[in-house]
Image (tube, grey):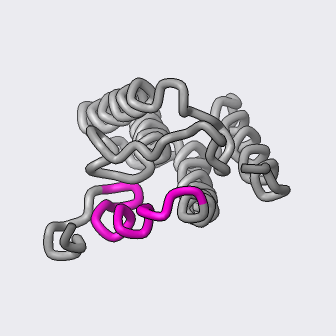
Amino acid sequence: MKKTRKDYFFVGLQMVLFVLFVMPFQLKQNLPQLPQWPAQLVLIIGLIEVVWALMQLRNFISVWPTPKDDSELVTWGLFAIVRHPIYSGIILVTAGYAFYKTDLYKLLICLALFILFYFKSSYEEKRLTERFKVYPRYKARVGRFFPKPPSLRAKP
């Protein structure tokens, strides 16, 4: 499938947000000091999620929302639980790190990433539906970033 301007926009904005996240900038107002182990746990779960999803996708991985021409729809393993585990893993990593560092600036970047990933995944799902006719059924069963409660899942 051919990439569009939206592909470049979403990936470009994502890279800008990643750079802003790692910049050593801090707002004067920090988050309240909380126990650090929950933040560390969220960060570790997010890292595991990203690595697991990357291992599952192998040759089909792409930074672009438009699927590769030779791609296959992965719906097993972690992808049977969430449709976009790399995005949700990144959200967990950035949120966990922001709370670990009690850094409001990093938390705001995390929120911006969440919003970006919502719109990027919506566009990606439109493209996936064009490429894979079974995608709407998969989408009805599996949550976008986090697992769907059983009562909201469509029957297979």
Q: Nearer the viewer, residue 131 or 42?
A: 131
Please say if 36 is above or below 114: above
In the image, 155: left or right of 65? left
Q: Quadrant of the C terminus?
A: bottom left
Instruction: Identify the residue at image location x=68%, y=43%.
Output: 64
**Rendered image quadrant of residue 45:** top left
Instruction: Identify the residue at image location x=65%, y=38%.
Output: 63
Which segment did they paint magenta? 131-146
Return the x and y of residue 19 as percentages of the image width and height. Answer: 72, 34
**Is 143 inside the magenta-drawn segment?**
yes
Return the x and y of residue 42 as percentages of the image width and height. Answer: 31, 38
Instruction: Identify the residue at image location x=22%, y=75%.
Output: 152
Q: Mark yes or no: residue 102 visible.
A: no
All told, the count of numbered labels is 0
Please say if 4 is above or below 76: below
Residue projecting furthest to the left? 150
Instruction: Identify the residue at image location x=57%, y=50%.
Output: 29
Return the x and y of residue 116 as percentages of the image width and height. Answer: 63, 57
Q: Nearer the viewer, residue 21 or 50?
A: 50
Q: Mark yes or no: residue 42 visible.
A: yes
Return the x and y of residue 109 as percentages of the image width and height. Answer: 61, 48
**Rendered image quadrant of residue 146:** bottom left
**Rendered image quadrant of residue 141:** bottom left
In the image, 118: left or right of 13? left
Q: Nearer the viewer, residue 1 or 19?
A: 1
Q: Nearer the viewer, residue 32 or 37?
A: 37
**Is 7 inside the magenta-drawn segment?**
no
